[in-house]
Image (cartoon, helix red, strand yellow):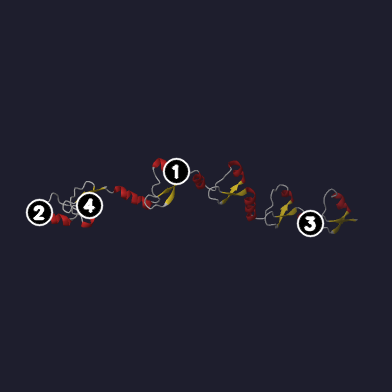
C-alpha cells in the first residue's frame, strides 16, 4: 500500500510505501536524491552586486556577510570599515578606518600635513630680488634666516658679503674723485694720469698705481 506525499523542495506529488513512511515519520521525505541535496543549500543575494549565491544551510546562520567574490568583499570592507574625511590642511579627501578615527580623531591625511599645520609662517621680502615669500617664524627669529627667497639669491648675497668695502680717493694728478677698495693705497685714477704726471714733472711719482686695467678704476 502506498501513500501520496508532496516534495517540500520541488512541490511535486510522489508516492511511497506506507511502511517507509511510517519508518521515517519524524523525518522530511523528498521525492529524489536531487531534491534532498538541494534542500541543504540556500540562495542569498550578494550584498554588493546583487548576484545570487548558494550557501550551505549549516553555514548560513554562522555567516555575517554574503559576498560572491573577492572584489565584492573588498568593496564591502571599504564601504563599512572605512570613511571619507577632509584634510584640515590641504583640503583633500582621504580614507581612514572608522575604528582608528574614533580612537585618534584623525584630522590630516599625512604626517606632512600634520607637521605643516603646526608651523606658523610669516611673509618676508627678499633683499636681493624683492619677491615676497613665506618663512617659518621660529626659524627666522632664532637662526636669522629668511633674508632671501631661493638659493640663487643666497649665492648673490654671499658674493656681496665677500666683497671688500670701497672708499673714495682724490687723484693726485687731475684731482678727480675715484673709488678704490679699502686698504689700497692707489693715488691715481688711471694709468693715463700716472703717465701724464711722470712726463710733466720728470720725477718719480709718490706711488706707482696698481697694474689693473683702466675700467677697473672707474
Question: Mark 2 or 4 closer to N-term?
Answer: 4
For this view, does 2 lie left or right of residue 89? right
Residue 48 versus residue 201: which sits nearer the camera?
A: 201
Considering the numbered disc 2 on the image, is that residue within a helix, a strand or a loop? Answer: helix
Label 1: few (<14), some (14–19) or many (≥20) C-alpha neighbours in 10 Å: some
Placement of the C terminus among the 4 image quadrants? bottom left
Considering the numbered disc 1 on the image, is that residue within a helix, a strand or a loop? Answer: helix
Which residue is denoted by mark 1 in the rendering? 137
Residue at x 33%, y 49% (from the top left corner): 158
For this view, does 97 lie left or right of residue 66? left
The answer to whether the residues at label 4 and label 3 have Cβ atoms under 8 Å apart is no
Question: Mark 1 or 3 closer to N-term?
Answer: 3
For this view, does 40 lie left or right of residue 95? right
The answer to whether the residues at label 2 and label 4 have Cβ atoms under 8 Å apart is no
Disc 1 versus disc 3: nearer the observer: 1
Label 2: few (<14), some (14–19) or many (≥20) C-alpha neighbours in 10 Å: few
For this view, does 167 lie left or right of residue 19? left
Considering the numbered disc 3 on the image, is that residue within a helix, a strand or a loop? Answer: helix
Disc 3 versus disc 2: nearer the observer: 2
Which residue is denoted by mark 3 in the rendering? 35
In the image, is residue 97 above or below residue 72?
A: above
Label 4: few (<14), some (14–19) or many (≥20) C-alpha neighbours in 10 Å: some
The answer to whether the residues at label 1 and label 3 have Cβ atoms under 8 Å apart is no
Residue at x 42%, y 48% (from the top left corner): 124
The answer to whether the residues at label 1 and label 4 have Cβ atoms under 8 Å apart is no
Which residue is denoted by mark 4 in the rendering? 178
Residue 74 versus residue 18: which sits nearer the camera?
A: 74
Placement of the N terminus among the 4 image quadrants? bottom right
The dot on residue 201 is 2
The answer to whether the residues at label 1 and label 2 have Cβ atoms under 8 Å apart is no
Amino acid at each position: 500500500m502506498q501513500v501520496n506525499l508532496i516534495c517540500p523542495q520541488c512541490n511535486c506529488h510522489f508516492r511511497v510505501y506506507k511502511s517507509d513512511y511510517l519508518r521515517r515519520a519524524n523525518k522530511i521525505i523528498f521525492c529524489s536524491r536531487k531534491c534532498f541535496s538541494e534542500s541543504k543549500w540556500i540562495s542569498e543575494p550578494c550584498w554588493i552586486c546583487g548576484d545570487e549565491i548558494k550557501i550551505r544551510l549549516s553555514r548560513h546562520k554562522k555567516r555575517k556577510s554574503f559576498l560572491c567574490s573577492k572584489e565584492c568583499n573588498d568593496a564591502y570592507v571599504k564601504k563599512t570599515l572605512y570613511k571619507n574625511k577632509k584634510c584640515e590642511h590641504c583640503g583633500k579627501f582621504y580614507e581612514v578606518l572608522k575604528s582608528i578615527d574614533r580612537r585618534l580623531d584623525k584630522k590630516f591625511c599625512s604626517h606632512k600635513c600634520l607637521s605643516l599645520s603646526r608651523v606658523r609662517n610669516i611673509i618676508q621680502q627678499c633683499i636681493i630680488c624683492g619677491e615676497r615669500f613665506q618663512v617659518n617664524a621660529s626659524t627666522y627669529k632664532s637662526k636669522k634666516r629668511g633674508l632671501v627667497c631661493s638659493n640663487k639669491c643666497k649665492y648673490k648675497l654671499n658674493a656681496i658679503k665677500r666683497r671688500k668695502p670701497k672708499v673714495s680717493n682724490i687723484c693726485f694728478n687731475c684731482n678727480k674723485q675715484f673709488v678704490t677698495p679699502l686698504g689700497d693705497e692707489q693715488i691715481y685714477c688711471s694709468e693715463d694720469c700716472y703717465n701724464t704726471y711722470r712726463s710733466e714733472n720728470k720725477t718719480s711719482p709718490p706711488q706707482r698705481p696698481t697694474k689693473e686695467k683702466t675700467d677697473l678704476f672707474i
